[in-house]
Image: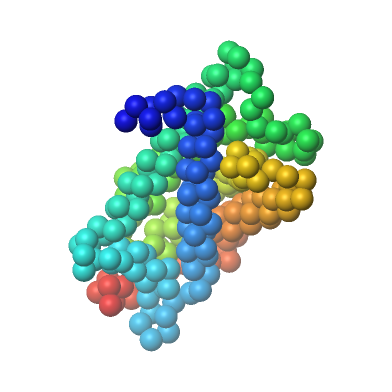
Amino acid sequence: MSLVRDFYGSTVGKKIVMALTGLVLIGFVAGHMAGNLKIFAGADPSTGVYKIDHYGEFLREMGSEMFGHAGFLWIVRVVLLVCVVLHAMSGIQLARLNRVAKPAGYKVTSYRSANAASRTMLYGGLFLIVFITFHILHLTTGSVHYRGFVEGRVYANVYSAFQSPVLVAFYVVSMALLGLHLYHGTWSCFQTLGVDTPRWNKTIRAAAKVLAVAIFVGFSAVPVSVAAGVLQAPVQAPVQAVAQ
């Protein structure tokens, strides 16, 4: 335990923890966005169940033979929660150290276009924690949905949630901040892990841009499509069909 404490107690250790947890969270965000886009796949013609509802059921039943219903999904959620906590703690502590000692930190000076992204990292990250908490209560547990949330009815829950222009705007702004956070954070992760040679910097920066824009567009497309009428009101099959 002393080795772990000494490692995390150092500035380098905090940066490495932040980078590794950041990579895990980037992978999750990309996968989550890809799953969300299934909302545009419509319904299964044979059952009438929306394909995103089938996808949600697949996630809940994944690994059920070993972990029970939604067991594996909760393991993933716990791992992600730990990553979020470690990532946030490391970021806050590093920001505090920067204010006190003003160490070198991330190499952002070589990329002028990263200035806006780098300036929003701390406060944008804190805002994203608030957003993540709200999002879980809104569309995972339904605790603050207030529009007839039904577990397993993913399409219907999303459609009803984004009848509110305020929520649509809130989600789009949150995704813009997420995109900025990912843009700066992605190439910062690789720099922290030592991949910061001139040979790779332009490629990493370009990939970070593409990822940030793709995440923003992919996530924002759902609430905007509901608000614009691209996604139609749900016509649901019986609940039993969702679990088949």
Image: 156 above or below 7: below
Count of number-bearing discs: 0
Q: Please state, as top left, top right, bottom left or bottom right, where the C terminus lies in the image.
A: bottom left
Q: Please state, as top left, top right, bottom left or bottom right, where the N terminus lies in the image.
A: top left
Colour scheme in use = rainbow
**Is residue 60 in view?**
yes
Asked if residue 98 lies left or right of residue 109, the reply is left
Counting from the top left corner in percent of width and height, residue 115 is at 73, 33
Counting from the top left corner in percent of width and height, residue 170 is at 54, 42
Residue at 60%, 38% in the rendered image: 192
Q: Residue furthest top?
A: 100
Asked if residue 49 lies left or right of residue 33, the reply is left
Image: 129 above or below 37: above
Between 158 and 75, the one lying in front of the other is 75
Asked if residue 189 lies left or right of residue 58, the reply is right
Between 244 and 214, the one lying in front of the other is 214
Q: Residue furthest front?
A: 3
Residue at 47%, 64% in the rendered image: 35
Image: 217 above or below 187: below
Counting from the top left corner in percent of width and height, residue 72 is at 29, 58
Image: 131 above or below 231: above
Counting from the top left corner in percent of width and height, residue 21 is at 47, 43
**Is residue 162 in view?**
no
Residue at 52%, 48% in the rendered image: 23
Residue at 48%, 74% in the rendered image: 42
Between 226 and 193, the one lying in front of the other is 193
